[in-house]
Image: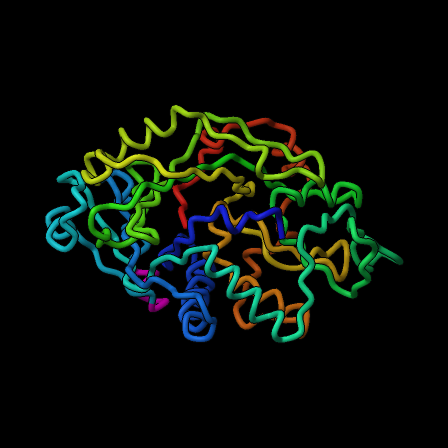
């Protein structure tokens, strides 16, 4: 894991994604979050729903996926602006907005989830090594043999790389490349409202951000910085705490969201978190084995949705390591799907997030 990445996560999840594989894996994740909410002391999945908000043009693109959602039994409801306001008066979308509601969606508070999960797996006998930097991957005879860390060598028959933005640097010494780029992302927490916010998580595509209720009656908002160049992690000892956000973004997010969530106008910012999200060349995450190095597996490039994928990705990787197969066909996520020449060209070109020209994908 990577330097407190999960603590900087938004914790939002929806099952209404863009491809059949991603929808099926998210269905699994939603089931597991609910299961963990019953089993893990100190953790609760907040099943408030997830409203994906669209302007007419972007809705025309998403509307074509409704048949797929029906076939895969991913529930949804389409709402116009009047219906949204009627259900959640705190939200005031533009008159031509369209909402795609995922009734199973919601959010977790990352600090609650990570702490509860760590406590449970320790009870089960799992050794968790914290603040131990991985400096290299060990191989012998063409297959994985473990990792080198600041605490010494750890031998293993299988290694799962889930360090996202650090991965390119760690695998470069092995002559391996994966076409992923990292970008800075920021989220902000308000002071408590006078009364707790009552509305679902909102992925507000026209506003280039998202908003959700947060613990203590607060609001949590995030915004993209599409004009900022990619961030390259060149050392295994890189720390997220070295990142910073442009102060102007606080004004931008207010400008974007004030009319949609009028309560925001009179609230002050209480804190901000800055981290990295990693985006692959073709927008699909990387989950599975590295064919060139038997015993090495990766789970990365979740595009800011790593927390949402956490339980499902973990289960599928565990199945693959232990049984050599997965309960869901995740061949579409194979790390070996990329052409080497295209990958090299992608990595050689320095881009901003906006220049990637990718379809909107949030949580």
Say how the picture is coloured. rainbow
In the picture, residue 154 is in which quadrant? bottom right
Position of residue 236 measured from the top left corner of the image (x, y, whole percent): 71, 41
- Please state which of residues 19 and 14 is positioned toward the viewer in this rendering: 14
* Residue lying at 55% horizontally and 42% vertically, measured from the top left: 278
Q: Main secondary structure of the magenta part?
A: helix
In the picture, residue 23 is in which quadrant? bottom left
- Seen in the image, is 193 located left or right of residue 317? left
Position of residue 25 measured from the top left corner of the image (x, y, whole percent): 47, 63
Q: How many marks?
A: 0
Residue 284 visible to the viewer: no
In the picture, residue 42 is in which quadrant? bottom left
Q: Is residue 55 magenta?
A: no
* Residue lying at 13% horizontally and 49% vertically, measured from the top left: 89
Position of residue 276 measured from the top left corner of the image (x, y, whole percent): 54, 39
Q: Which residues are magenta?
A: 67-73
In the rendered view, tell whether residue 197 sits above or below residue 44. above
- Seen in the image, is 279 located left or right of residue 347? left
* Residue lying at 72% horizontally and 60% vertically, measured from the top left: 159
Position of residue 184 measured from the top left corner of the image (x, y, whole percent): 51, 34
Residue 307 visible to the viewer: yes
């Amino acid at each position: 894991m990577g330097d407190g990445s999960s603590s900087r996560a938004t914790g939002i999840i929806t099952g209404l994604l863009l491809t059949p594989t991603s929808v099926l894996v998210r269905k699994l994740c939603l089931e597991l979050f609910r299961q963990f909410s019953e089993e893990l002391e100190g953790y609760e999945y907040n099943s408030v729903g997830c409203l994906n908000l669209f302007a007419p043009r972007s809705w025309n693109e998403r509307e074509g996926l409704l048949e797929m959602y029906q076939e895969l039994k991913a529930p949804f409801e389409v709402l116009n602006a009047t219906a949204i306001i009627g259900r959640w008066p705190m939200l005031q979308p533009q008159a031509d907005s369209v909402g795609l509601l995922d009734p199973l969606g919601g959010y977790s508070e990352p600090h609650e989830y990570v702490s509860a999960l760590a406590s449970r797996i320790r009870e089960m006998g799992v050794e968790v090594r914290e603040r131990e930097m991985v400096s290299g991957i060990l191989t012998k005879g063409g297959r994985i043999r473990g990792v080198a860390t600041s605490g010494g060598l750890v031998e293993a028959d299988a290694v799962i790389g889930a360090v996202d933005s650090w991965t390119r640097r760690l695998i470069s010494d092995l002559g391996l490349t994966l076409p992923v780029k990292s970008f800075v992302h920021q989220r902000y927490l308000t002071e408590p409202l006078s009364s707790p916010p009552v509305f679902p998580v909102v992925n507000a595509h026209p506003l280039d951000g998202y908003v959700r209720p947060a613990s203590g009656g607060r609001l949590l908002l995030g915004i993209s910085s599409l004009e900022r160049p990619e961030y390259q992690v060149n050392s295994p000892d890189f720390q997220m705490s070295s990142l910073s956000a442009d102060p102007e973004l606080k004004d931008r997010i207010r400008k974007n969201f004030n009319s949609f969530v009028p309560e925001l106008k009179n609230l002050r910012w209480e804190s901000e978190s800055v981290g990295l999200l990693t985006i692959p060349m073709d927008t699909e995450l990387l989950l599975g084995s590295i064919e060139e190095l038997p015993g090495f597996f990766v789970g990365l490039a979740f595009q800011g949705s790593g927390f949402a994928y956490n339980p499902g990705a973990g289960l599928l990787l565990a199945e693959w390591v232990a049984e050599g197969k997965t309960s869901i066909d995740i061949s579409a996520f194979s790390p070996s799907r990329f052409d080497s020449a295209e990958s090299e060209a992608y990595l050689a070109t320095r881009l901003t997030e906006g220049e990637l020209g990718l379809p909107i994908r949030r949580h």
